[in-house]
Image (cartoon, helix red, strand yellow):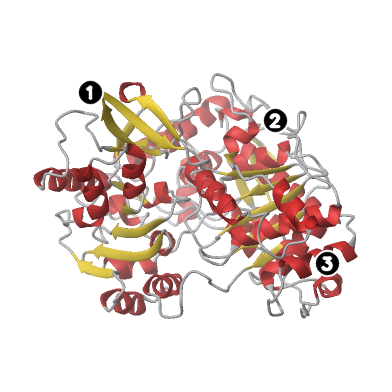
Amino acid sequence: MGQAPTGTHRTPRRVARRWSRDLNDVLQRLRRLADEGAIDRFAVQFAEFLARKDPGADAGLIVRGAELAHALSRQHTCVDLAVAPAPPFPGSASAPADTSSLIGDGTAPSLLTQDRGLLYLTRYHRYEQAVAADLLQRCRMQVNVDETRLADALVELFAGTQAPDWQRIAAVTAATRGLAVVTGGPGTGKTTTVLKLLAAIEMAAGHARTVALAAPTGKAAARLTAAMRGAVSADAPGLSDTARDAFAALPTAATTLHRLLGARPFEAGFRYHRGNPLPVDILVIDEVSMVDLALFAQTLAALPAHAQLVLLGDPDQLPSVEAGNVLRDIVHAGSGEAAAAFSAETATRIERITGDAIRPAESGNRLQDSLVRLDHNFRFSADDSVGIAATAALRGDVDTVTKVLAGSTTGSALHEVDANTAPALEGHYAAYSRTLASGADVGSLLSAFESARVLGVMHEGPLGVAALNDSIEAALASAGALRPDTTHYHGRPVLITRNDYNLRLYNGDVGLCYLEDGQPLAAFRQPDGTLLRYLATRLPPHETCFAMTVHKSQGSEFDEVALVLPRPNESAGRELQTRELVYTAITRARERFALYAPDGALGAALASRTVRMSGLPGRLSHDPPASPPSEPGQQLELF
């Protein structure tokens, strides 16, 4: 594929030169690669589009354009011109000719942009520039705060903690800078930290601030809402009147980023943007690892220049389903140790306010003074099987993961399964089955169902989500727990697969079908805990979800989680089976985690890492343009 015929030897450079003499031959070869399944059809279509726009373009540029389109379908935002195109794309490591009108340097409209040795679709180049410029500007923004009042607030809110207290350091970072990035795994207290840091900001300011809470998905927003409502207590004993007032002023309802920005069902773009900024003083975004580059750029564009931004997330989880890996790029710019490094000036200020002594260091990350990582885990004990398995998975330590799951005494387990047959998984829904049999109301039934979840890697295949759903449904029906005799049978769990802004149902929302007076209805829990009820026949596109993909589960947590890994050499799922996927699945579990995998599947997954090409880390290690570039024009929005 893309190589010389048998018996002929050509170096990559000679192949590239031969292609450049005949653009039509280039396109024919790309079409054959797509027919063989070696590259995406979109890559060929984009190459043809470029060739139509400039029939005289160098063939090397057309090949690089096809490679870029192929990379975008795999969530990269650019390709590295210093590296030869990955097979099956032929060619050598060289910059494409810049004589074509197709390519520019980012200062004028063009379809492609070449910058810092990277090739972008211009829209993504501008997104990346704007994100870097905005983050650096907010990191440099010093907030005018009464340090004495802030110190007093922190003493009250973090009483009895030991130094250095990284939650307290996160609070002073958020209170004194325009940007705070607080990272850590599940159970490290990110939500508790944001609650206290918001209260500290209110107490130090002495007046109310407009605060918005947001997350990338409805489920993540619901979990943030529940966590904030469970943590906020203005009636807690021992609080001063100032602290009580601060807690009482905090918002407890989170929304999705799309709803926050004012998504319009029948119009492009959002209600809020650079020309009509959000009416907020502080924006908190949870689960930032799930936010793609485009949405993040649009969010920053809508944020007023004076507003403080607090980002929460776990950079070790799976990245967004769209292009980019924003949180990991932010945290790992420079040496990768930026979350534990502060400039001398910032370290001195933190010690002056909190008493926490921090040794100053330079990481090469220009955002280092805004980054704080929480490492102490309050959820899992030192001998907890879920916590140990998650930590070992991050290290790629298959032996420890295997040992701790196989030897668990707390309900976690390891099962070796046949790669061609869905395992027996209905036992994970025992509580749901009992609640269903009891005739409980739909709210109780939904709570029981939400306590456990089976996760898969991909949708199709013998161990894909579709097959797992069929298997679990059939087993529960055979046991008499449910009667799937109609499409919307009583107790059927459903996953929404397409946004419906009018119904306020969004991709990833999970609900339950139920019968009331013979009428098939569906109920979905809202962030405030209430249920939205619909005629089941009015639901937007949806599917059964006894099992769901790990990607769809992000932003959710369950008491019990089961992960089913397919055979490691299945081409359809090989790219998806990564260390980050296993870690994300494990950390969805609060109490118990079970792994079902054919022999060798776990080792193969932990040996594979999720890597996304991006120029953002480089921009966060150097000075970007002084102000955010203008947003792409409508011509470029096509790509």
In-front residue for pair 556/325: 556
The residue that disc 3 covers is 152
**Extreme-left residue of the structure:** 478
Q: Residue 371 appears at what percent x and percent y? A: 70, 64
Classify mark 1: helix, strand or loop.
loop
Q: Residue 427 appears at what percent x and percent y? A: 20, 57
In-front residue for pair 175/114: 175
Is tag 3's residue or tag 1's residue first in the polypeptide sequence?
Answer: 3
282, above or below 164, in the image = above
Q: Amino acid at mark 3?
A: Asp
User: Is 132 displayed left or right of 445 in the figure?
Assistant: right
Q: Residue 635 appears at what percent x and percent y? A: 63, 25
305, above or below 367, in the image = above
In-front residue for pair 391/483: 483
The residue that disc 2 covers is 272
What is the number of callouts on the image?
Answer: 3
397, above or below 66, in the image = below
Measured Cα–Cα span from mark 2 to mark 3: 37 Å
Q: Residue 106 appears at what percent x and percent y? A: 72, 40
The residue that disc 1 covers is 518
Q: Amino acid at mark 1?
A: Gly
